[in-house]
């Protein structure tokens, strides 16, 4: 955008004088004391630690307007960086309202948009032309596939998407091809992956193209190669404001730090306690070392929360206090005390879904809007049971950040395999999975099958059987397709011999579909594998495969309620920045939340930050639940309450058994959870509401070798005793570890 008419020095001075002259203190009167400090601390580096619900957007926009009204800078001398286009538009609109006029000539936008703006002006400095193309993911993958073939890399062992993911991570860390050096991933593809990265960048230059990672990485490289360009922008941007600083990656951090070196008037707003995106490259260390990067920085803590009740805030604050890697703050509010956070123990995931569904229905019956209620899960596969329960109750819902369970790509693929087994003439299902996972079938082969099927008015599989007896299809794809049909014939025969649950498990494994996602290194792959496990679990609720497929058809055909008033289902990662009157937080069990993978990889503190984010989404009511048992990949597993439950302050939580929430199951047997495991050991939950449950000596009740009965697994013999846990060899279910509260003498 061109510079406004106030371009010369006299016009600039007049503009600043006019803005200063129109200063109205009323806009500062709407701020609390800490917000006002953040707005008025104009000069020098400032870090605003903005807790959940403390009004950070108001601070950001008011600070921008304040700098302009004080005549400290012209709009084009300010750089405001956001993470989304929506946030950038909101910032522009709100500043415009404060000033009473639209903003012109200033630099506001996302990291990538601003990076592209600079690169377009100086593209030659990094070997590009100003009209360079920004590639999307499909284009990137096409280039990577070509390079994989050129370098003789096995694309099955090292798929293009995996290679691209590694390159993107290097770019997020600010590493050009000559800098990857000892990076952990350099041994991939027989050590050729760094060569692929170098060739990839060379190919992009030849194409006069850049990918999204380049928009920041090449900017940093430009500043390093041409100090005079860097100096120009350092002098230009007198004030820099950054939103969501805790979510910046290394490349974004380097870009900002370079630009801020001249005036050092950089204000970063963020919350270290809400840094939950390390899997996307975010580095919480960026915000933690702000004071070291900018000596003399002023730190302002926004701690007054305008969203949640005191009990919810105290519970969240008590939980996050267990993190060591944080700058520290304590949220408070002057709202009415409100309800305590409730904690419910239930028998299994099905009862958990019934309890949540019934509570939603009860609240709705009392006039609570469905829009103000949300179920926040740790993993996407958890939504399945809640979706089915809400459908049963006729409660409209929406899934945010992902498709409904049975609409997800991997679930549709898996069900397509089962549909072909149940109905060989299901052409739509066969079309979907004939080349998934990849079987080397080209377009010509598939077209041949389609043309013949249409000409002979035959289903695809029937047509294919005839074609396989001819030379119409080339030998290699003919062999592949013959093997695929043999697999379907064998699976169809097995359907009469094994359960439909075992059949589904076998089909997913033998088809290579599960292995395909295991080999996929994208961030979505683990979640897709979890969803496939949940699909197998869902099959157990039906007598046969036909009943399950009919159920899926009815679910998929379920018409969306015309009303916009719907319960929200989403993952905790997707909930950041949102708020609801009532929040349900299911699945607080060890291994699920905190997720075992995160614990094993040293990510426990980020998991705790995720729990903090979940709690602080609630305005009035927060309900936590855990189950004693969960079905994982069709097998029952005994679950132990999350260590996070033990870390919640006892005075701010309440056992649901005292309130009648989630009736039945553990609500009728509170002693079933006499203790919970935290940090790898068994200990009494004596720091929270579960302390009220009676505690008895397990050793006195059971002995090794004793015959016992378990409500879910049947009869068995005690093998070992560990506190409140028993290891039992069950006659039908095999050896399992269970809580003693669910076991009785046989």
Image (tube, helix red, strand yellow):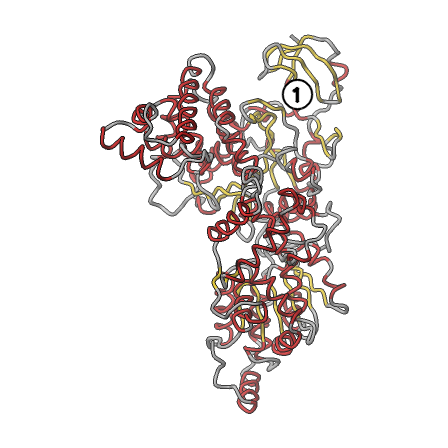
Residue at image position (72%, 47%) is 321
Quadrant in which the C terminus is drawn = top right
Q: Nearer the viewer, residue 636 or 505?
A: 505
As rendered, which of 730 and 477 lies closer to the eye?
Answer: 477
* The quadrant where residue 643 appears: top right
Q: Position of residue 57 (x, y in %)?
A: 56, 63
**Dot 1 surroundings within 10 Å: few (below 14), some, or many (20 or more)?**
many
Viewed as shown, does residue 686 lie left or right of 640? right
Seen as rendered, the residue at the extreme bottom is 10
Q: Is residue 46 above or below residue 245?
A: below
Task: State the image quarter where residue 641 is shown.
Answer: top right
User: Disc 1 designates what residue?
Assistant: 738
List x then y, in percent, for residue 512.
50, 29
Quick check: 103 left or right of 165?
left
Residue 315 visible? The answer is no
Q: What residue is shown at x 35% (from left), y 41% (from top)?
A: 560
Q: Quadrant of residue 500?
A: top left
Q: Nearer the viewer, residue 660 or 315?
A: 315
Q: Establish if 476 lies above or below 283.
A: above
In the image, 381 versus 257, the foreground residue is 257
């Amino acid at each position: 955008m061109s510079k406004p008419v106030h371009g010369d020095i006299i016009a600039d001075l007049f503009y600043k004088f006019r803005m200063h002259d129109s200063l109205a203190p009323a806009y500062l009167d709407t701020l609390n004391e800490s917000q006002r400090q953040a707005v008025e601390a104009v000069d020098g580096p400032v870090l605003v630690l903005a807790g959940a619900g403390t009004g950070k957007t108001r601070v950001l926009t008011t600070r921008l307007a304040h700098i302009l009204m004080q005549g400290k800078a012209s709009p084009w001398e300010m750089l405001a960086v956001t993470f989304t286009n929506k946030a950038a538009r909101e910032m522009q609109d709100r500043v415009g309202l404060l000033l009473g006029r639209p903003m012109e000539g200033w630099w506001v936008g996302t990291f990538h948009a601003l990076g592209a703006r600079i690169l377009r002006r100086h593209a030659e400095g990094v070997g590009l032309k100003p009209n360079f193309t920004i590639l999307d993911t499909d284009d990137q993958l096409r280039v990577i596939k070509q390079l994989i073939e050129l370098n003789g890399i096995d694309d099955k062992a090292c798929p293009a998407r995996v290679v691209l993911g590694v390159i993107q991570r290097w770019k997020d860390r600010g590493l050009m091809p000559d800098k990857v050096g000892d990076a952990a991933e350099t041994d991939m593809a027989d050590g050729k992956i760094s060569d692929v990265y170098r060739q990839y960048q060379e190919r992009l230059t030849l194409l006069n193209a850049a990918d999204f990672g380049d928009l920041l990485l090449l900017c940093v490289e430009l500043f390093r190669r041409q100090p005079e360009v860097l100096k120009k922008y350092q002098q230009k941007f007198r004030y820099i404001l950054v939103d969501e600083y805790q979510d910046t990656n290394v490349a974004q951090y380097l870009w900002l730090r370079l630009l801020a070196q001249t005036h050092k008037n950089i204000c970063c707003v963020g919350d270290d306690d809400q840094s939950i995106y390390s899997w996307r490259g975010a580095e919480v260390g960026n915000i933690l070392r702000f004071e070291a990067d900018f000596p003399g920085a002023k730190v302002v803590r926004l701690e007054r929360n305008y969203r949640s009740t005191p009990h919810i805030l105290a519970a969240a604050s008590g939980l996050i206090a267990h993190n060591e890697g944080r700058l520290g703050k304590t949220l408070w509010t002057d709202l009415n005390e409100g309800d305590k956070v409730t904690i419910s123990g239930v028998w299994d995931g099905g009862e958990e879904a019934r309890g949540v569904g019934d509570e939603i229905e009860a609240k709705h019956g009392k006039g609570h809007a469905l829009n103000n209620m949300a179920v926040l899960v740790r993993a996407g596969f958890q939504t399945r049971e809640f979706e089915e329960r809400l459908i049963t109750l006729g409660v409209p819902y929406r899934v945010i950040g992902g498709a409904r369970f049975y609409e997800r790509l991997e679930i549709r693929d898996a069900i397509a395999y089962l549909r072909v087994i149940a109905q060989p003439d299901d052409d739509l299902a066969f079309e979907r999975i004939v080349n998934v996972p990849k079987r080397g079938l080209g377009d010509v082969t598939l077209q041949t099958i389609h043309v013949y099927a249409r000409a002979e008015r035959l289903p695809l599989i029937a047509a294919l059987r005839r074609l396989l007896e001819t030379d119409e299809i080339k030998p290699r794809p003919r062999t592949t397709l013959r093997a695929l049909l043999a697999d379907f014939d064998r699976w169809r025969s097995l359907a009469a011999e094994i359960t439909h649950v075992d059949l589904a498990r076998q089909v997913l494994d033998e088809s290579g579909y599960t292995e395909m996602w295991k080999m996929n290194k994208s961030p979505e792959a683990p979640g897709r594998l979890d969803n496939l496990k949940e699909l197998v679990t869902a099959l157990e609720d039906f007598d046969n495969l036909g009943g399950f497929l009919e159920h899926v058809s009815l679910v998929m055909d379920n018409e969306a309620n015309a009303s916009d008033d719907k319960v929200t289902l989403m993952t905790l990662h997707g909930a950041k920045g949102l708020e609801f009157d009532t929040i349900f937080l299911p699945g607080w069990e060890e291994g699920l939340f905190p997720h075992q993978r995160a614990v094993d990889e040293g990510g426990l503190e980020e998991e705790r930050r995720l729990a903090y984010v979940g709690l602080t989404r609630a305005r009035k009511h927060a309900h936590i639940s855990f189950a004693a048992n969960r079905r994982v990949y069709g097998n029952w597993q005994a679950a132990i309450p999350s260590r996070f439950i033990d870390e919640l302050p006892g005075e701010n939580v309440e056992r649901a058994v005292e309130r009648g929430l989630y009736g039945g199951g553990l609500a009728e047997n509170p002693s079933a959870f006499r203790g919970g495991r935290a940090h790898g050991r068994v200990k009494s939950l004596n720091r929270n509401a579960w302390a009220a449950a009676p505690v008895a000596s397990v050793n006195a009740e059971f002995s090794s070798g004793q015959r016992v009965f378990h409500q879910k697994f049947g009869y068995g013999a005690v093998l070992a005793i560990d506190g409140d846990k028993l290891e039992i060899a069950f006659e039908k279910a095999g050896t399992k570890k269970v809580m003693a509260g669910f076991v009785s003498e046989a």
